[in-house]
Amino acid sequence: MSQQPLSMSIYGGAEREPSDLMRRLNQEALDTARKKIAARFRTAADLEELPAAVAQTQKQNAQAESQLGLAAQGKLEALKRAKDIMDESASKLNTLFASIRKVDEKIYNTNTQISNYEYLTRVHYARENINRVLTQVEFFAKVPETVANLNQILDNDPSRLKEVFIQALKLDSLRLALLKEMGMQKGSGARRRTSNADSRGKGDYSEESYNRVKTLLDKHLNVVPDLMKRIRNLIYGYIDRFMEVGAESPQDLVMAIEIVEMHQEYLDRRAEQNRRRAEAVGNNGDKAAMENYENFSEEIQQRVR
């Protein structure tokens, strides 16, 4: 079986089979060369210039090979520099990873050692609780400012009603959750005092303390229900004039309907969470908490009838 000899590359290895692109380029080069030769040597007299043309072509070929060799050498040197940089970077990364592992081990050992000391553990959890409380206090302290900014948005750009509604719903949900938590603390404290008159759980509210704190919170956070009321009235206004709004600015009508759907979905999720919580504790759920949320969808159904 005959075998085609493999051509050798300039590096001494066997060259691979040329690609279709290389074949096409070689063919174009041969065609161009034939045309130039045919154009230059048309007569027998032109053949006298053949030695000079060969010498010139060899000189040009030598120059091209020299230029290619320099370019290839430059590329090889650049690749070598890149490889050296990569090797150096890999070494530094390995050193860095080793340092990180040592730091992680020290952190793990430190946490383990802290857990062996009761007072340090208490200080750790106390610090976390204080940070959590400070974050909540800062948030609730800024509620009036946040609501004022949301009202300003409605004044300047009513088309951002949906954005304002989402933020207002978050504020209202957190407000009601805080009031609910206070009620739970009040109830649990009352039960413990009934079972043990000489003991009072930390964080419990007496009736007087609960009412005083609730009054202060209602006064501080009443801007949130006012904002929800404003949003509700804007939505109801769009629905009451849905024919006119649909003709003049249909995007506002679509936005109002989207808000109603979002609010209904939110109520459905809360109702489901309330049902699961009720099943877990074995009661009928917190009906009062759900009653604090007005159902936009039901009101709108009444308005469009």
Image (cartoon, grey):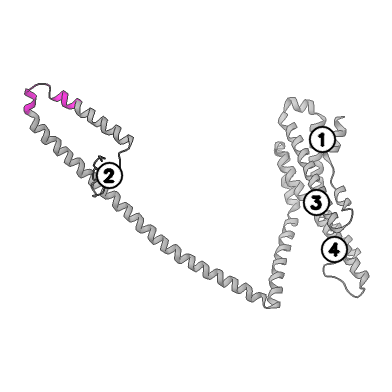
Crowding near pointer 4: few (<14 within 10 Å), some, many (20+)?
some
Q: Are marks 2 and 4 in contact (CB under 8 Å)?
A: no
Within-10-Å neighbours for mark 1: few <14, some 14–19, many 20+? some
Question: Could you tell me the amino acid type at mark 4?
Answer: Gln
Q: Nearer the viewer, mark 2 or mark 4?
A: 2
Q: Residue at x 20, y 42 (%)?
A: 65
User: Of label 1 and label 2, which has the lower sequence position?
Assistant: 2
**Magenta stretch?**
35-48
Q: Secondary structure at mark 3?
A: helix
- Residue 32 image position (x, y, % from top left): 22, 28
Q: Residues within 10 Å of mark 2 (few under 14, many from 20)?
A: few
**Is the residue 120 above or below the residue 177 in the image?**
below
Q: Quadrant of residue 218?
A: bottom right
- The disc at residue 236 is 1
Kindly identify which residue carries mark 4: 185
Inter-mark Cα distance, 2 to 4: 84 Å
* Labels 1 & 3 near each other (Cβ < 8 A): no
Seen from the viewer's position, the closer of residues 2 and 217 is 2
Identify the mark nearer the N-term, 2 or 3: 2
Please, what is the three-letter code of the amino acid marked with disc 3?
Gln
Circle 2: residue type: Glu
Please indicate whether residue 40 sits to the left or right of residue 125 in the image.
Answer: left
The reply, left or right, for residue 112 in relation to residue 62 is: right
Q: Residues within 10 Å of mark 3 (few under 14, many from 20)?
A: few
* Identity, as a three-letter code, of the amino acid under mark 1: Tyr
Nearest the eye: 236 or 10: 10
User: Looking at the magenta stretch, what is its main secondary structure?
Assistant: helix
Mark number for residue 15? 2
Label 1: element kind = helix
